[in-house]
Amino acid sequence: MLCAGVLLAASCAVSSTPATPSAGESCSQSQCHAEIEQIHYGGPALRCVDCHGGNPEALTKEGAHVTVDTSFNPSSPGKHVLTDPPLVDLAAVPTDVMKFLNPADYRVVSQTCGSTSLAGGGCHAIITNDSLLLNRATLAGQLAGGRFIAGAQGKAPIVGVVPVQDPFVPTQQPPGTVAHLDGVPAQVPDAVTSAMARAYYPIYEQMCAECHLEREGPKVPGRYYSLGCAGCHMTTADDARTATTDPTQNREEAGHPLRHRFTNLIPDSQCAHCHISHLGRALLARGVREKSEPDGDTALPGGKNKGAADPPNAVPWAKENYTKFNGMLWEYGKPWPYFIEDEDGTNGTDETPPDVHTAKGLACIDCHNMREAHGSGRAQARMDQELDVRCQSCHGRPGQKGKLMSDAAVTFDQAGSAVGTDGPNPQTVKTLGDGTVQQRDKLSNGLHPVTQITTRTDPTQKLYNLRTRMGCQLHAGTAAARQALKAEVNALAASDPVAVQKQFPGLPPNFTFPAVAQETDGRLECFACHNAWTVNCYGCHMVRDDRESYVSRIDGQTRQGAVKSFGLSVVADALALGFNSRGHIQPMVGTSIFFTHIDAAGQTVIDAAPLTTGEGLSGEGNVHNPVHHHTVQKIPRDCTGCHPAADGATKTSAVLRAIGLGTGEFTFTDGAGKVHWLDRLVAGDYDGDGKPDDPAVFGVPTALAGLQRLVGTTHMRQPGLSGGPDPGPLDLETVNRILLNKVVPQRP
């Protein structure tokens, strides 16, 4: 039966003890799976048939195995090989066959990992039931976002890669959750009436339906993962090949987990197999980015848009990070040299350093908790609403120590490395006897001090730092902490205006804060400043060509209208700010898509036109979404990256981009000849005549009389939050506040 162990071969350290044959089972005969690894490293003993089914007493493969007709790999038994299967083919696999092939598949997991009776019961029923509702399983938020960008629907999810029904009655449906999802249709629904949205629809069944836990990842270096629970808990090597001790397995064939072993100690390399696509955080955290595509769409007949060239001294990511595949070096589906690890190899400075947490040895699982990984028991509208760990969860903020738990009151602990509740599950982030906070990382057991920002901004504390106080307390402090600092600055300005700059770095002489009716908490996310570099991708040209065919990843049908994409400019430091779903300010990343449709006769039906969102916004950057790049550094970026400089040395392009007015550095010319500024989120009225003005002519304004929103966001306001702006570009009040508060540059 455990020939399916190829599919479930897993992670963690190899067990020194081979699997022990269970009474009455023939699976572990010497000629079969006698040397295969133990699946669990704790908990109740499991027989092979508990998970995979089959006949434990049979002495032949045909008699023992549930099926010899279906498999996921050519070397496995089966006349029907499910290679890159569409959703319809996976749904058609009989339950007992899918259980045999992959007991961790979400279609059968309630009978295996989530069983309430298996091996005496008490397995992972709650976790598995919650996981079925995750966006990583349903793709609900991503599909809603993609369809919204093209005008095919509103922001609220209505479809998923699988149908979903909330397990609770509708009267209990909380805001921000999804009561029901239909399966995503392969063909454009009649309700979609926009000609552009209808023509664009094949994108979803070719590209969007590729990456989720209801199907395997692509069998290419750095992209392969298994289905369901095994997608995370059974690690896969970058070459997608197995190193199992099971003698029956083909070690040269791509498409197998590493070993037949579950683990909770999930390495970052496993997370990267999904979270690498398009500016993937798993790559940025290591200090590496995608290269730009300076040829843009000029490979397309009539294409006239070029991208930004990468710096001439850019250093490619080293060859040893790539995997040998078909005689070439590949990683994450890209050939060497594709990724860049240093913008300039001649200056002795790494402009794109790895995230400080990654550099210190912390892994994804050290921050992202059990609730984020497995869900809350409700189907959330978007993935960002499934996240509840903030920088402040550990580090606190000025005026407030870290609570050492997430917004949902989930503490940081070993996260179930001990099975169930039997055995120790110690906290990994805790306060020591001297009041300091320490974190133990899960993969190496290393100890790390956790800075409490309030001790860095309190003048009575030994670790007090004045610059930290000026940055963090002003932008992210509690209302009381901000009010106290402003009062202190204003008092000094009244008695000795010249001393303001000396005693409060960043403020110019004679500076005073304007009076406000009521002080509020700071609205900046910590990483708005501490993401030391922010990658953006400007310009994406999607081309549907009806002269070429594709196979749908949804229903498996072959249709005309293959889609290709042409990228333009990937840049390593292009900071634009906007509001996230919590009403806080953080970096934004652009999704500027232009679409061409070529019909079967070779005629261009739609010529490089900007998409129109479900809100009716079109052109410029189209959609900019809030994003955490995971490029945190201890020393934040300079204040003049957002504010005008008090000494007159304003970084014009940086300020214009940060507040959303755009720079004109990154453009796309559509089929009608109109030039779009891809880093432009809003149009500003400089002179008060009620009409938008050209930043290229006016430069950085001292104030704006009006602001017109040009781009949207796929994000929605977090439920339970009242007041504050909706997600999207900055508003007029915030832009004018940034422009009013001139600052002294802190670094060259």
Image (tube, rainbow, N blue to C red):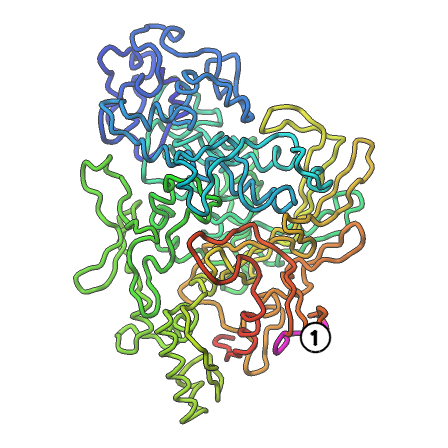
**Mark 1 sits on what residue?**
698
Residue 517 shown left or right of residue 435 in the figure: right
- Image location of residue 713, percent across then percent down: 57, 53
Residue count near mark 1 (Cα–Cα under 10 Å), binned few <14, some 14–19, many ≥20: few
Pick the quarter of the image with the N terminus. top left
Residue 488 shown left or right of residue 688 in the figure: left
- Image location of residue 581, percent across then percent down: 48, 55
- Asked if the magenta segment contains residue 700, the reply would be yes
Q: Magenta region: which residues? A: 697-704
- Image location of residue 276, percent across then percent down: 50, 44
Location of residue 118 with respect to 344 vertically, above or below? above
Residue ID at (27%, 40%): 416
Which one is in front, 273 or 89? 89
Which one is in front, 288 or 691? 691
**Dominant secondary structure, magenta:** loop
Looking at the rendering, which quadrant does residue 266 occupy? Answer: top left
Disc 1 on helix, strand or loop?
Answer: helix
Looking at the rendering, which quadrant does residue 314 occupy? Answer: bottom right
